[in-house]
Image: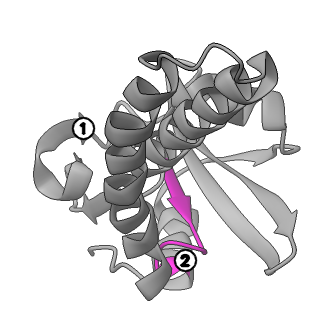
Amino acid sequence: MKTKFTFKAFLPPLLLIPFLYLIISVIPGIFITKNYNTPLFPRIFIPSILIFTFFILFGELRTKCINVAINKNEIVVKRFFGILTKTYKTSEIEGWKYSHLTGKGGTYEYLYLYTAGKKVVKISQFYHKNYFNIKNYIQGNFKYLGYEKLSYIDEFKEIFK
């Protein structure tokens, strides 16, 4: 069983390119200027927002835009659209939890697979069109560990792990 991306899963990589371009083109222009009358706030605020947004999008791409193939004996996780591949034995997986993320676009469910008390796989309804098929398979084959309340602090920390 293999996950399939929704159209929304292609937005973070597509947005990364313009943000990288803005960082490369705008930031040097802000700091390498002969006009010293420019207020300090935009010189700090604009680069900070651009870099922060870039890291958030990169983290979304790294942690949530993943392709997962679940076989009888292993789970293969491909990050960055197949560039990085990690394989877990199904015997290593302790179980799964789920949580809900509510935003302006609606409420989406996330499913986490755990190994040694750590989240190793994050499958989301937002990024995967066959999320409920994958969830049904996981429910039948792995131990349920409970509901995990969504923490934006934990989500932010996972971006930089």
Q: Residue at x 65, y 35 (%)?
A: 46
| Quarter-of-image position of residue 104 | bottom right
Element type where label 2 sits in the image? helix
| Highlighted range, magenta | 122-131
Give residue 116's mark: none
Give residue 136's mark: 2
Q: Is residue 134 visible?
A: yes
Note whether 18 is above or below 73 in the view shown. Answer: below
What's the amino acid at mark 2? Asn
User: Is 132 a magenta residue?
Assistant: no
Q: Residue at x 41, y 47 (%)?
A: 22
Q: Residue at x 73, y 29 (%)?
A: 45
Front-most of 39 and 6?
A: 39
Q: Position of residue 12 (x, y in %)?
A: 44, 61
Front-most of 39 and 104?
A: 39
Q: Position of residue 16 (x, y in %)?
A: 38, 53
Front-most of 40 and 48?
A: 40
* Crowd around label 1: few <14 · some 14–19 · many ≥20 (10 Å): some
Q: Position of residue 40 (x, y in %)?
A: 76, 16
What's the amino acid at mark 1? Lys
Residue found farthest to the left? 83
Labels 1 & 2 near each other (Cβ < 8 A): no
Whole-Å distance between the Cαs marked 1 and 2? 19 Å
Give residue 89's mark: 1
Q: Residue at x 13, y 54 (%)?
A: 82
Q: Position of residue 96 (x, y in %)?
A: 60, 47
User: Is 128 a magenta residue?
Assistant: yes
* Crowd around label 2: few <14 · some 14–19 · many ≥20 (10 Å): few
